[in-house]
Image (cartoon, rainbow, N blue to C red):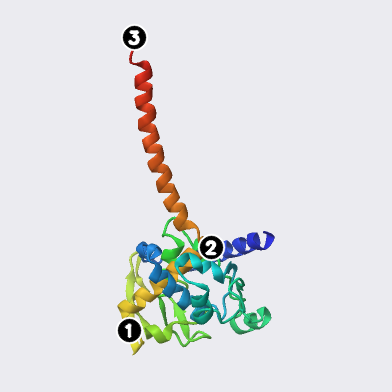
Amino acid sequence: MKKLIALLLATLGLAGAVQANTGGIEWDKFPKDKMSDMASLQHGAKLFVNYCLNCHAAAYMRYNRMHDIGLTDADIKNNLLFAADKVGDTMKVSMDAKEAKAFFGANPPDLSVIARSRADGAKGSGADYLYTYMRSFYRDDTKATGWNNMAFPSVAMPHVLWELQGQRTAKFEEVADPHDHEKKTHVFAGYEQLTPGTLTERQYDEAVADLVAYLQWMGEPAQGQRFQLGVIVLIFLSFLTVFAWRLNAAFWKDVK
């Protein structure tokens, strides 16, 4: 429990730093219908294991919890179990924490609750942030990794999905400052594709949405059941209210 609390505090603190660095960038809306699509969640799990689990752990998530998104033990063993021996193991990485800090300047954060920790009431949900973040990388040779990000400027993480999206650079326009016409500011003006990826732009957006859906689900695997139970309870209370109202009317109909 103490480790989980420490993890939450760390991720929330990092989220605050990220929000302070974003400079008011608008977050795109994550397609919420992905959360009820089992195929999307399964594809997101595949992307997570193949591209994220190499450096980031999800130490509070067990492989066999993926039964909830329709995967069997055989599916998990044959397609997703690369960093563990048993489907009951947690999703840890073999990379040493000291080596990771030396490589990246900081130990890559655990992603168990990453979607929940990135929420900002003024901008959107944590899923909105992640959906924007994973689609905002661009080439920047001034950075150690060769990559930068519009949602998280000077991010230490390289673009792990670049082969899928391709390489692109960000374009900036010089415009006059509205408060000081003699002062010029640089405004983001879109991306320029340098090399194509293995996916089209639309396919890449779909893949990122699947990945984010899995990250959102992983932060609270029981959320689907919770939503369904909430609807059932509300329907029950509605019928109970009508029944109580009519029963009350029957009790008091002869009272003047």
Q: Mark 1 falls on what kind of element?
A: strand
**Chain-order first, disc 1 or disc 3:** 1
Q: Nearer the viewer, residue 62 or 251?
A: 251
Q: CA distance from mark 1 to mark 3?
A: 79 Å
Relative to residue 131, is residue 228 depicted above or below?
Answer: above
Q: Position of residue 241 (x, y in %)?
A: 38, 32
The three-letter amino acid code for the residue at tag 1 is Glu
Neighbor class of circle 1 (other Cα within 10 Å; few <14, some 14-19, many 20+) is: few
Residue position for label 3: 256
Q: Which residue is mark 2?
A: 16
Question: Foreground: 228 or 101?
Answer: 228
Query: Between marks 2 and 1, how big is the CA–CA gap?
Result: 30 Å
In the rendered image, the quadrant that contains the N terminus is bottom right
**Amino acid on which disc 3 is placed:** Lys
Q: Which numbered dot is residue 192? A: 1
Q: Residue 83 placed where, x, y %?
A: 59, 80
Quadrant of the image occupied by residue 61: bottom right
Is any atom of residue 38 visible in this view?
yes
Disc 3 on helix, strand or loop?
A: loop
**Which mark lies nearer to you, 1 or 3?**
3
> Residue 87, image x and y in percent?
58, 73
Q: Nearer the viewer, residue 38 or 135?
A: 38
SS at circle 2: helix
